[in-house]
Image: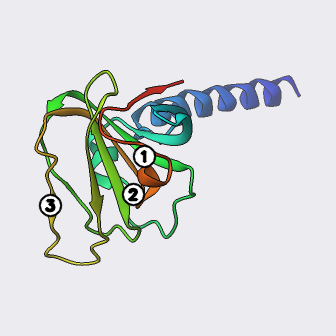
Amino acid sequence: MARLGLFLLSLLLVFLFVGRALWQDAPELPRKRVLELTTARGPVELKVEIAATPEAWARGLMFRDHLPEDEGMLFVFPQATGSAFWMKNVKIPLSVAFADAHGVILRILEMEPCPKDPCPSYYPGVAYRQALEVNRGWFARHGVREGDRWRLR
């Protein structure tokens, strides 16, 4: 009986060790956080998934059929970029706001779904560090404009 217990304990430790190693190599899963936007109308809260890896940036909101009204995806980049966004394989019409490192909104664009190539590119025309995608029209419905600010809570 003692041998069986020792064997099971050894097996458990092997599974824990292998599982931990596999977990550490797994891609980062989206984390939901609350983003508070400061507008002329007052504060607005939005639940966001954080995209902070090249894999998450590339996938974005592709292949989703629905985005809840008060949710979005926040793209966070390690340095300023002027790269375009595009909507290939995105099924939901979106609005995107581009912000600096301090969360000050520099530009807001409206984007259309694009089920197949060729898909248009949406250039903000400014260098940005963060981008926030929400359902199309969400910014307008909540009074969010260029110059407003956001911060993660």
Look at the picture and state if 28 lies above or below 136: above
| Circle 3 residue | 121
Please indicate whether residue 143 sits to the left or right of residue 47 in the image: left
Location of the C terminus (image quadrant): top right
Helix, strand or loop at label 1? It is strand
Labelled pair 3, 2 in contact (Cβ < 8 Å): no
Labelled pair 1, 3 in contact (Cβ < 8 Å): no
The amino acid sitting under disc 1 is Met
Upstream in the sequence, badge 2 or badge 1?
Answer: 2
Image quadrant of residue 125?
Answer: top left
What is the basis of the colouring in this image? rainbow
Look at the picture and state if 41 lies above or below 65: above
> Badge 2, how many Cα within 10 Å: few under 14, some, many 20+?
many
> Can you give x and y, in whole percent of width and height, for residue 140 in the image?
42, 53
Labelled pair 2, 1 in contact (Cβ < 8 Å): yes
**Residue at 42% from the left image edge and 42% from the top image edge:** 144
| Circle 1 residue | 73
The amino acid sitting under disc 2 is Leu
| Circle 2 residue | 61
Image quadrant of residue 53?
Answer: top left
